[in-house]
Amino acid sequence: MAEMPGTILALETSSAVASAAVVGARGECLGESRPAESAHQARRLLDCVDEAFTAAGSSLRDVETVVCGLGPGTFTGLRIGVATARALAQAAELRLAGVPSLEALAGGLAAGEAGASAATFVPLIDGRRGEVFAAVYRRDESEAAERPAWPRLEPVVGLTVVGLDDLAGFLAPWPDALVGGDGALLHADRLPPGVAPEPAVAAPSALMAARTLLAGSPRVTWGFGETLPIYGREPDATPRAVIPGAATPGTATSGTATSGTATSGTATSGIATDPGGAPTTTTRESRP
């Protein structure tokens, strides 16, 4: 991390539960909002931001850095989250950063009570389509001596799209790993015998994203050019066939993002790569 991020506004929209948090430079939560689970949770994101600022007794004028969870996760949620972070940072001339949501979720597992005795962490985010987004992390070897306030992790296996029928096999090499996230809770019946999901860590949160940033993860992205969604695979929706004489699909209109610029409700186009080094469109295991 090149410079201290100061007071942070954090956003996380990769799962079915969106969240916003105002976080101090030492990782203390100044204000947080997490609405009830909803199919349209990300569309309430600005309300979440207002609630977090109200709880913190502050405003965007007090923020120095905006950070958002990059995914993988729901396509609509990621677009809304990244676009909102970009728009707020651009409007207020703030620094912009992004955190891989799987790493933030793994940090939440490692920071919890159950994580104190674990060395390996497997965050699972529900990907629908009978799949989960998965990765494997372990504690950074330098952490034992330094004992940071938030766990520093390193990837063992990068972002992997795992079919539910293959989930037990994916987890088999790490029988003692702590597993969590909505992908684990929703599909607990697909986990190997003896492996139970951690119920206290159901989804990545804005607070987890901010603390991962403060822990100095090398997989954090900085700047508008680098902070893009990690979709993990091709979109569910596919472009319609071009009808002769009709407008060309993909033409930018009001409310649609153009390359490199975020506007209301959407994010930049294209498939981003995983800051951890793995291509996000692969469905095969990727080791760093």
Image (cartoon, helix red, strand yellow):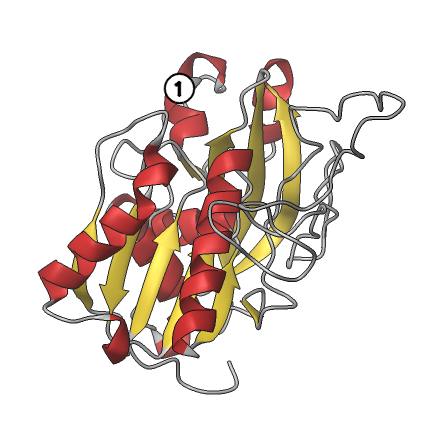
Out of 7 and 256, give the one closest to the viewer. Answer: 256
Q: Find residue 47 and report its horizontal and vertical position in percent.
A: 24, 47
Tell me the crowding category of disc 1: few under 14, some 14 to 19, or many 20 or more residues within 10 angstroms, Cα based. some
Does residue 119 appear in this view? no
For the point 73% across and 39% down, the residue is: 250
Residue with the mark numbered 1: 186
Q: Residue at x 85, y 24 (%)?
A: 242
Whole-percent x, y for residue 244 in the image? 90, 22
Quick check: 112 left or right of 249? Answer: left
Vertical arrangement, residue 280 with respect to residue 217, above or below:
above
Q: Quadrant of residue 283?
A: top right
Image spot of residue 146 (x, y percent)? 37, 78
**Circle count:** 1
Q: Is residue 197 above or below residue 221?
A: above
Q: Position of residue 69 (x, y in %)?
A: 46, 53
Dot 1: element = helix
**Amino acid type of the residue tagged 1 in the rendering:** Leu
Side of 56 relative to 126 (left or right):
left
The answer to whether residue 276 is seen in the rendering is yes
Q: Nearer the viewer, residue 240 or 15?
A: 240
- Left or right: residue 217 versus residue 16 is right
Quadrant assignment for the C terminus:
bottom right
Residue at 37% x, 54% y is 11
